[in-house]
Amino acid sequence: MERFDIISNNPPQTQQLGKNIGRLTLPGDILLLVGNLGAGKTCLTQGIAYGLDIDEYISSPSFVLIREFSGRLPLYHIDLYRLDLPEEIATLGLDDYLYGSGVCVIEWAEKGLNLMPSDFMLIRINYLDDIKRSFELEAKGTHYNKMLKELKAEKTYVPSNRHLNR
Ligand SMILES: Nc1ncnc2c1ncn2[C@@H]1O[C@H](COP(=O)(O)OP(=O)(O)OP(=O)(O)O)[C@@H](O)[C@H]1O
Ligand SMILES: [Mg+2]
């Protein structure tokens, strides 16, 4: 099992990490984001969207549980924050997205872990200080192991605030 730990020193670096991830995604990919309120899950998702050539700004889907964006591949931005009961999550029809041809990015994924297929990328985000976060990426399955190896080899981790305030 491949792992990759990396520190982000500011939001643009988180977005750059997301962009690098987004560029490597293939149809059907599942990226599970785990981290407290304000950890940076949506910030990372903004970068993933950018890596998928999506121009729209991704915001926190407070009341909308699933939002779809079109880019190089469709992006399904899913947020399970407001759901607690396993029954509620089960009725969302997540399978249509999980087994679809787009990329699923799921915030608060721990709430729906039992509904996930066996292979995915798990991304844990920890708050270090007001602008620093640690990212722990864990690959489950061959495809995601390969993706993580490619991500490790990626040299572009240049802070850029280009997409911060779109
Ligand atoms: N290195 C960093 N990476 C990401 N966000 C950071 C970083 N440093 C500071 N921040 C700030 O932390 C906040 C992260 O917010 P974001 O909406 O991405 O969190 P979230 O994990 O999606 O929260 P929620 O659980 O409410 O959806 C933003 O205000 C962002 O500017
Ligand atoms: Mg969020």
Image (cartoon, rainbow, N blue to C red):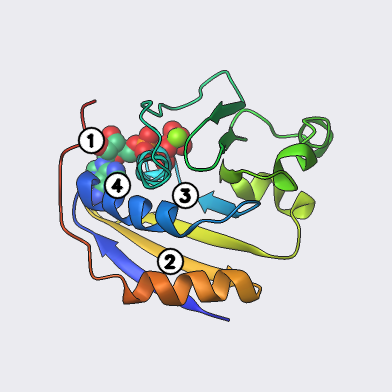
Mark 3 or mark 4, which is nearer to you?
Answer: 4
Q: Earlier in the sequence, mark 2 or mark 1?
A: 2
Circle 4: element type: helix
* Ligand 2 sits in quadrant: top left
Report how far apart the C-alphas of labels 1 and 4 lie in the structure: 8 Å
> At 23% across and 45% down in the image, what residue appears?
11
- The image shows a total of numbered marks equal to 4
**Left or right of 127 in this view: 33:** right
Residue tagged by mark 2? 136
Mark 2 or mark 1, which is nearer to you?
Answer: 1
Question: Within 8 Å: ligand 1 and the Cβ of disc 4?
Answer: yes
Residue 108 seen in the figure:
no
Report how far apart the C-alphas of labels 4 and 2 lie in the structure: 15 Å
**Left or right of 13 in this view: 59:** right
Circle 3: element type: loop
Give the amino acid type for the residue marked by disc 4 in the picture.
Answer: Gln
Q: Which of marks 1 and 4 is nearer the N terminus?
A: 4
Please report contact status of discs 3 and 4: CB closer than 8 Å, yes or no: no
Against 104, is 63 above or below? above
Please report contact status of discs 4 and 2: CB closer than 8 Å, yes or no: no
Residue count near mark 2 (Cα–Cα under 10 Å), binned few <14, some 14–19, many ≥20: some
Mark 4 or mark 2, which is nearer to you?
Answer: 4
Residue count near mark 1 (Cα–Cα under 10 Å), binned few <14, some 14–19, many ≥20: some
Q: Which of marks 3 and 4 is nearer the N terminus?
A: 4
Against 145, is 62 above or below? above
Circle 2: element type: strand
> At 71% across and 40% down in the image, what residue appears?
97
Residue 163 circle label: 1
Give the amino acid type for the residue marked by disc 2 in the picture.
Answer: Glu
Residue tagged by mark 3? 35
Q: Position of residue 121 (x, y in %)?
A: 56, 62
